[in-house]
């Protein structure tokens, strides 16, 4: 059998649990409890440990809840950020698709550069009889549109030249 004083010493002074003592002494937990119940300090120590474990449990529960709330708050903020981004993107797309959106004259000319030719630093519509009503006949070129127009015109000329050379090569 095991020594009662040794069990008392391990439980009260060394603060070991009943399970640890049972494993160390190679006896059952019930046997250890039965031996400890003979001592009057056992009930006091048992209540003290119970109160101590209650405090630990409450603290761990508080920490868990706090951590869980932080995670939920981060997830909610991320969802709101995504939602507002989606709303902003939808607003932009609706504005792009909208037929009532106003386009400036510069944008109109820029969108139809292929229908203009450059004459004296101005862009002139090629065929005024077939010109849409919202496009101007002539347009004073800004620094932005003129280089774009010249690039476009050069690209068209190079394609024409390439096609003429290809035609001659094929003959």
Image (cartoon, rainbow, N blue to C red):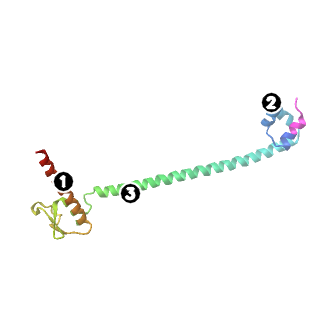
> Neighbour class for label 3 at 10 Å: few (<14), some, many (≥20)?
few
Task: Choose the circle earlier in sequence order: 3 or 2.
Answer: 2
> How far from the left and from the top, in percent, is residue 14?
83, 43
**Residue visible at 43% across and 53% down in the picture:** 83
Residue 77 in the image: above or below residue 10:
below
User: Residue 106 at x, y = what percent?
Assistant: 24, 66
- Report which residue position mark 1 lands on: 159
Q: To which residue does mark 3 refer?
A: 88
Quadrant in the picture for residue 131: bottom left
Q: Is residue 162 magenta?
A: no
Q: Residue beneath label 2, please?
A: 28
Query: Which one is in front, 132 or 18?
Result: 132
Q: Residue at x 44, y 53 (%)?
A: 82
**Which of the marked residues, 3 or 1, is nearer the chain's N terminus?**
3
Q: Residue at x 78, y 35 (%)?
A: 19
Q: Is residue 110 visible?
A: no
Q: Which residues are magenta?
A: 1-8
Which residue does the image show at 21% across and 69% down from the upper left? 141
In the image shown, does 134 or 152 lie closer to the viewer? 152
């Amino acid at each position: 059998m095991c020594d009662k004083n040794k069990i008392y010493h391990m439980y009260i002074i060394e603060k070991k649990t009943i399970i640890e003592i049972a494993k160390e002494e190679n006896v059952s937990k019930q046997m250890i409890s039965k031996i400890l119940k003979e001592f009057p300090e056992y009930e006091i120590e048992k209540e003290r440990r119970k109160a101590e474990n209650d405090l630990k449990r409450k603290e761990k529960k508080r920490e868990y809840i706090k951590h869980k709330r932080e995670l939920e708050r981060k997830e909610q903020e991320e969802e709101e950020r995504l939602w507002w981004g989606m709303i902003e993107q939808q607003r932009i797309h609706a504005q792009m698709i909208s037929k009532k959106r106003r386009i400036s004259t510069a944008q109109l000319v820029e969108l139809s550069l292929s229908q203009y030719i450059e004459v004296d630093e101005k862009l002139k519509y090629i065929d005024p009889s077939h010109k849409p009503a919202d496009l101007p006949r002539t347009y004073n070129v800004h620094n932005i549109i003129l280089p774009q127009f010249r690039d476009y015109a050069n690209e068209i000329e190079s394609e024409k030249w390439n096609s003429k050379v290809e035609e001659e090569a094929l003959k």
